Amino acid sequence: MKNNMIKQIIALVILLASPLVMAQQNFDDIEIQALKVRDNIYMLVGSGGNITVQIGAEGVLVIDTQYAELSDKILAKIRELSDKPLRYIINTHHHGDHVGGNENIKNAGFTLSGGNVGAALSTAGEGATIVAHENVLLNLASDENVSTELWPTLTYFSDKKDIFFNGEGVRIIHQPNAHTNGDSIIFFRKSDVITTGDAYITSFYPFIDMSSGGTLQGFIDASNAIIDLIIPEYGQDGGTLVIPGHGRLSDIGDVINWREMLTIVRDRIKDMKDRGMSLEEVLAAKPTRDYDPRWAGQGIFSTENFVTAAYMTLED
């Protein structure tokens, strides 16, 4: 029974993560809303993962692109914020609700020679630069149904990559084996804003993508990394703001509450597993019962899916 359940969950994960499958929704009534986060940083909300937009004299930087069917609406909203050229796209991971619009958004921008944003427009190449961890490329390339036009054009292998754009240092930090094996969180160092992708969300339990190397401990490690970057609010100075992969704009208190939930659930399930309880017995024991009213969702965000993935990814 356990093996069949795991196979079903992994099959559902692979199916739902595909940009092609996710694009089969009806987006006619979806509106793209823009929330000013701080200074020149905006959060766009539509369907799928939240989008971060940084604007400035040098151009536009976008983090994640939602679905291809929403690209025209997304680009129209960006043009309300800035008429500067779109230069960079950063993908937080490879799932379709975050990379589905890569091709369309990329083709609306351009790349300057050698990444020199001060270069003449005559040196520009076609398409914005898509930046992501190498594992994002590998995950997308492993799916023969995904167009190469969605692939990142600039990848990094190390634990971080730095970009200086619009007068601001932008640090891209790899968070291994959290939501996936290719997660990145992005820290706008001057604006004091962090974009997390699905390594942190506010809507439901986390989706631990076991088929792409995701683990519960990786989520906890990512939460700690985010908290380490945050400067709390002090007096009249606003603290670091956090744009989650899904859900509302957050601060340090929200991320700490998320980490506490993950850590307590981990400890409960680990204790049960150490005592020899099977997955079926752990599910029946309901180790998340006090958190379910706040965090339980449907499908890949369900309590059953979360507990199963947590159990399977905890070391014996």
Image (tube, rainbow, N blue to C red):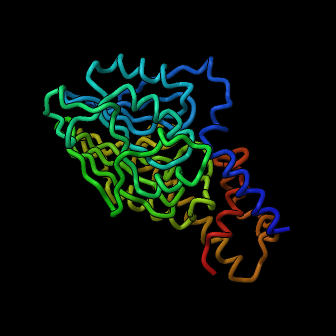
Pick the quarter of the image with the N terminus: bottom right
Task: Tell me where residue 161 appears, x and y as whole percent.
Answer: 29, 55
Q: Residue at x 48, y 36 (%)?
A: 50
Q: Residue at x 42, y 17 (%)?
A: 76
| 17 versus 304 height, above or below | above
The mark tally for this picture is: 0
Tell me the quadrant of the picture where the C terminus can be found: bottom right
Position of residue 109 measured from the top left corner of the image (x, y, whole percent): 33, 28
Q: With respect to residue 5, does 300 lie above or below?
A: above
Residue lying at 53% horizontally and 50% vertically, measured from the top left: 140
| Nearer the observer, 94 or 296 | 94
> Which of the 4 quarters of the picture holds residue 313?
bottom right
Above or below 315: residue 166: above
Q: What percent of the width, then of the height, locates residue 277?
A: 77, 78
Most foreground residue, 166 or 229: 166
Residue 205 on image: x %, y % = 62, 51
User: For this view, does 274 lie left or right of residue 233?
Assistant: right
Q: Residue at x 50, y 40 (%)?
A: 99
Instruction: Please say if 123 is above or below 184.
Output: above
Q: Is residue 136 left or right of residue 160?
A: right
